[in-house]
């Protein structure tokens, strides 16, 4: 069974940085893509970035361009989300999710395109 576990969330001041981790287990497929999403209170789930097993990357959200980057350690089956220059509007629960049997990231950060989800980690940015 595929399982994803996020970690690294917390409280940070505006302008600060955090690095989130997404550890995957139970992946028996060679081809997959892992995406980062977030959901702020009262809002829908927003796709942020994706990285695939073939190192394809895509940024879904203009709001994080130049501030957030995605990377992976395939040996550890871990995907990272480096978040710099954080803003109060980045406050949300952050999720990682995986879609399997694909060698490239979905072109759109549409949550139903992803099959398995982690439980989320809270990021709070204070002003």
Image: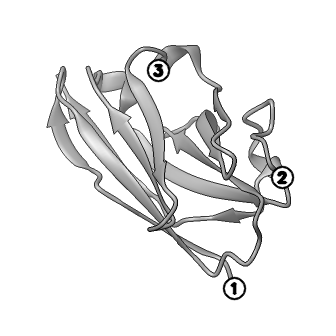
| Residue drawn at (52%, 41%) of the image | 38
Whether pointer 3 and pointer 1 mark residues with C-beta atoms closer than 8 Å, the reply is: no
Apparent side of residue 104 relative to residue 89 in the rendered image (left or right):
right
The answer to whether 79 is drawn above or below residue 28 in the figure is above
Residue 68: x %, y % from top left: 41, 27
Distance from disc 1 to disc 2, alpha carbons, whole Å, reads 18 Å
Label 2 sits on residue: 102
Q: Quadrant of the N terminus?
A: bottom right
Pair 2/3: label in front: 2
| Residue drawn at (59%, 22%) of the image | 61
Whether pointer 1 and pointer 2 mark residues with C-beta atoms closer than 8 Å, the reply is: no
Residue 30: x %, y % from top left: 75, 66
Label 3 sits on residue: 64
**Looking at the image, which is closer to me, 53 or 68?**
53
In primary-sequence order, the first of circles 1 and 2 is 1
Distance from disc 2 to disc 3, alpha carbons, whole Å, reads 24 Å
Apparent side of residue 118 relative to residue 105 in the rendered image (left or right):
left
The answer to whether 113 is drawn above or below residue 99 in the figure is above
* Mark linked to residue 1: 1
The answer to whether 65 is drawn above or below residue 51 in the figure is above
| Residue drawn at (61%, 42%) of the image | 51
| Residue drawn at (77%, 59%) of the image | 31
Distance from disc 3 to disc 1, alpha carbons, whole Å, reads 31 Å
In primary-sequence order, the first of circles 3 and 1 is 1
Badge 1 element: loop
Apparent side of residue 83 relative to residue 2 in the rendered image (left or right):
left
Residue 73: x %, y % from top left: 45, 56
Badge 2 element: loop
Apparent side of residue 94 relative to residue 14 in the rendered image (left or right):
right
């Amino acid at each position: 069974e595929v399982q994803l576990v996020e970690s690294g969330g917390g409280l940070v001041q505006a302008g600060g940085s955090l690095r989130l981790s997404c550890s995957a287990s139970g992946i028996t497929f060679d081809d997959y893509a892992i995406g980062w999403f977030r959901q702020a209170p009262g809002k829908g789930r927003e796709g942020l970035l994706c990285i695939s097993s073939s190192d394809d990357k895509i940024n879904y959200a203009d709001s994080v361009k130049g501030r957030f980057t995605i990377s992976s350690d395939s040996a550890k089956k871990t995907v990272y989300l480096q978040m710099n220059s954080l803003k109060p509007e980045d406050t949300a629960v952050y999720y990682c999710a995986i879609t399997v049997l694909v060698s490239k990231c979905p072109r759109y950060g549409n949550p139903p395109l992803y099959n398995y989800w982690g439980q989320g980690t809270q990021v709070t940015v204070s002003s």
